[in-house]
Amino acid sequence: MSSAASISAVTASFSTLLCQKSHSGSNSAARSMTVALPAFHGLKVSFPSGAPSADLRSCVAAQCAAASSGSSSSSSGGVVSMGCLEAGVGMMGTKMGMMTVFTEDGKAVPCTVVGFHEGNIVTQVKSDATDGYTAVQVGYRRVRDRKLTKPQLGHLNKVGAIPMRHLQEFRVVSAEGYEPNQVLQLEEIFKEGDLIDVVGNSIGKGFQGGIKRYNFARGQMTHGSKSKRQLGSIGAGTTPGRVYPGKKMPGQMGSGRAKIRKLEIVKVDPELRALLIKGSVPGKPGNLLRITPAKIVGKNIPKN
């Protein structure tokens, strides 16, 4: 943090914790400890466990200041930034269905049509100074007031936004150029030929066996075979005497979060507020989709 008031607030909130650490580590050998800072979501501070409380407060302040200034020095291994960075701010849309698009040379390209209802409005801009990380919160799909709770309505009314059902965050390196109650324009976010990542809930398949769920091979269908589609052995006998966790077995298939990376945008239609994406995306028609620029390490997101 750059401001002295913010740093002092952090150190004051952890004064009790630091004193406890200093007393408990007075008779022990010097070692490095890591303490998470709730006031800064995702930030951690490392310090010697036997150091006095005054030194610990100064260590917290110094590492928080280094984190906010973007210093690359990590001699103490202190500040850990939050992961799940996006390549840029994206949008939320609704899967409408699929169609075939013919190119100029006559090739048939299967495409998914994504529509955009009223929404995609910035509801909050988070920064390192206030929240400990940088993100842009976006709302989507207008609904009636009675469909939302009072806290949700209060959060949206604070910035003068319309009532929206879905709120999602896009964590980015920098949130410059985004303001609360700003409407994201489709033609400004995405261009034809861009690569995107699409996230949605996959279609539920119900309870399925190992062959369909994990592409297992079946047994013989003739010669008296009694294991045509059965799973087979799931482990040894006396040793280990149990089934290892994570064993691939029959169970619920689908109906979970799925992500398809690096899909190509075929066409952007601002008038119809529609997007044509090459290939298929998760879910059935009417499913909510989260569309972001494709992550390319070293190009639009940092390597570290």
Image: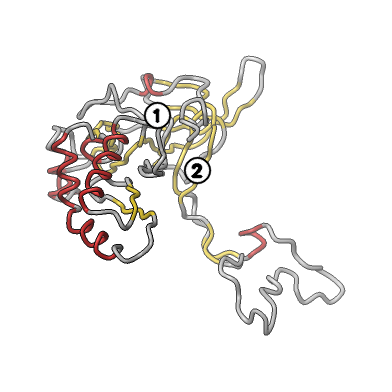
Where the N terminus falls, by quadrant? top left
Q: Position of residue 184 (x, y in %)?
A: 30, 25
Relative image position of residue 20 (x, y in whole percent): 23, 62
Q: Residues within 10 Å of mark 1 (few under 14, many from 20)?
A: many
Which residue does the image show at 64% across and 58% down from the upper left? Answer: 214
Instruction: Please give the residue where the numbered disc 2 appears in the rendered image.
Output: 259
* SS under mark 2: strand
> Residue shown at 23%/43% (left/top)?
58
**Residue 195 in the image, given as x and y percentages of width and height:** 52, 27
Q: Observer-nearest residue: 17 or 219?
A: 17
Dividing the picture into quadrants, the one containing residue 114 is top left
The numbered mark, 2 or 1, whose residue comes first in the sequence reads 1
Count of numbered circles on the image: 2
Which label is found at residue 269? none
x 49%, y 21%: residue: 267
Circle 2 or circle 1, nearest the eye: 1
With 304 as the anchor, is 187 left or right in this view? left
Mark number for residue 88? 1
Kind of element beneath mark 1: loop
Front residue of 300/184: it is 300
Using the image as rendered, state which of residue 82 and residue 126 is in the foreground.
82
Residue 182, percent from left and from top? 23, 26
Q: Is residue 81 above or below residue 275?
A: below
Is 266 situated left or right of 14 in this image?
right
What amino acid is labelled 2 in the image? Answer: Lys
Viewer-closest of 69 and 195: 69
- Residue farthest along the right direction in this orientation: 223
Q: Is 30 displayed left or right of 149 in the figure?
A: right
Residue type, label 1: Gly
